[in-house]
Amino acid sequence: MSYIDAVHAIAHNKIIIIDRSTLLTGSFNFTKAAEEKNAENLLILKGNKRLVDRYVQNFIEHKGYSEIYAGK
């Protein structure tokens, strides 16, 4: 299911949370161009449960502002 944030014009956050213990965040788009051409950054944080929990709470908060996107 996809959601669109109904409050903010752009949500440009890129985060991946793995097993509630590893956080990936940064400008990196998971595309070939990002990997081979762009100047991107990707931060991988492990073992900081408090920080991961804050990112999870932020995601839940923004999901609460969102509407289900049905597609075209």
Image (cartoon, rainbow, N blue to C red):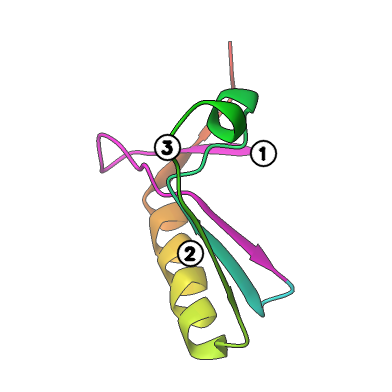
Mark 3 lies on a secondary structure that is loop
Q: Is residue 9 magenta?
A: yes
Proximity of marks 2 and 1: CB atoms separated by less than 8 Å: no
Find disc 3 in the rendering and name its residue. Answer: 39
Residue 60: assigned label: 2
Q: Is residue 71 left or right of residue 43?
A: right
> Which comes before the other along the chain, label 2 or label 1?
1
Residue range (magenta): 1-18
Find disc 1 in the rendering and name its residue. Answer: 1
Vertically, is 5 above or below 62?
above
Proximity of marks 3 and 2: CB atoms separated by less than 8 Å: no
Q: Nearer the viewer, mark 3 or mark 2?
A: 3
Vertically, is 53 above or below 62?
below
Percent from the top left, x then y, of residue 11? 35, 43
Q: Disc 3 marks which amino acid?
A: Ala
Proximity of marks 1 and 3: CB atoms separated by less than 8 Å: no
Percent from the top left, x then y, of residue 51? 46, 82
Looking at the image, which is closer to me, 60 or 46? 46
Please tell me which residue is depicted at 26% across the width and 42% down the height of the picture. 8
Please tell me which residue is depicted at 58% across the width and 69% down the height of the picture. 23
